Image (spheres, rainbow, N blue to C red):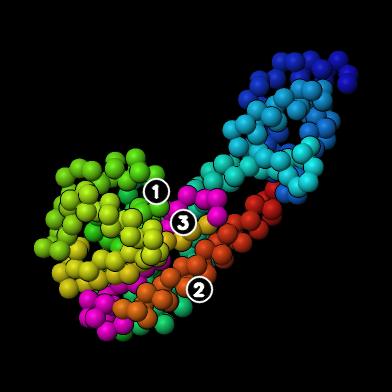
Amino acid sequence: MDKSTSGKAATEKPLERYVRILEIVAGFPGGISGTAVGEMLDLPKASAYRLMKSLADVELIEQSGPSAANFKLGRRLERLLFSGASDDWFKVVARPTLQELSEKTGQACFIARLSGDSVRSLDMVAPGDLVRAYIVPGHEIPAHAGASAKAILAFQDPNFIASVLDKPLKRFTAATKVDFDVLVEELQLVRKTGVAYCIGEDVDGFAAIAAPIRIDGQRTQHSLCVTGTIQGIIDTNRETNVAVVKRLAEKLSKILEKQFRHTLKSTA
């Protein structure tokens, strides 16, 4: 190490070193050793391992493969990257599955996404002759009355659920549930069955069935939903609609995870 490089390393801000380590580790999806990272940054071996251990302690990187000396991006950082993925990216990846659900059910279908403490529709597909669709992209779904919101909310931290539901809630129809304990019990059932319902709770005469889109290691932020009249969604085709929504939500989960991993590797 020459004097100029040594001086730079000595005066460089610690946060900059952490960021540079993350940039290097991101370029090696299969893992890279602390020794190699230290050499790339002109850092002493002990310093490189100390910095990498700090990153590993907060799950921004993690040990990779059989060698404890190798590191890759950690689950926590991947969660941050996944949470920040653009709506356009999700629309492109999810659209074929959304179209398949609409074709199989003959109903309007949409993807919902958690943003902050609210759930909004992200993208929608409906048969060309269907004029009763009322969920348009960007529409906010009431957390206590919408199936797509319940499917997401059920898999959140209890404190987050309380912050959203433990307050005065709007009663949209006679079927709207506004009691906190009743809603918590319903969310527990959603976690158990993997499906959420809205039967005339936000709009009279309309219903919806939704399933969460769950990706291993990621916070549940999306759901897949079919919506229409109570007769078309619940009274005549309930079991069929439940089965296809759950199956395609699981299919989309796998597609999203695979595409997200591919995106991480291609941008590294």
Q: Quadrant of residue 127?
A: bottom left
| Residue 195 position by quadrant | bottom left
- Give the residue at mark 3: 87
- Image depth: mark 1 or mark 3 in front: 1
> Counting residues from the N terminus, which is met first, the one under dot 2 or under dot 3?
3
* Mark with earlier residue (1, 2): 2
Q: For the view shown, which residue lies furthest in the right direction?
A: 2
Distance from disc 2 to disc 3, alpha carbons, whole Å, reads 15 Å
Give the magenta-colored segment's residue range: 216-237
Residue assigned mark 2: 96
Disc 3 crowd rating (10 Å Cα; few below 14, some 14-19, many 20+) is: few
Please tell me whether residue 82 is drawn above or below residue 163 in the rendered image.
Answer: below
Q: Residue sitting at 28 percent across and 77 percent down?
A: 233
Left or right placement of residue 204 versus residue 98 in this view: left
Q: Quadrant of residue 20?
A: top right
Q: Percent from the top left, x then y, of residue 124?
A: 38, 69
Q: Is residue 234 visible?
A: yes
Q: Earlier in the sequence, mark 1 or mark 3?
A: 3
Query: Which residue: 23% across, 59% down?
Result: 145
Q: Secondary structure at mark 1?
A: loop
Q: Residue at x 21, y 54 (%)?
A: 182
Q: Which amino acid type is marked by label 2?
A: Pro
Q: Nearer the viewer, residue 139 or 145?
A: 145
Query: For mark 1, what is the residue?
Result: 156
- Alpha-carbon span between mark 1 and mark 2: 27 Å
Q: Amino acid at mark 1?
A: Gln
Q: Which numbered mark, 1 or 2, is in the foreground of this view?
A: 1
Which amino acid type corresponds to the residue marked 3 in the rendered image? Asp
Vertically, is 49 above or below 69? Answer: above
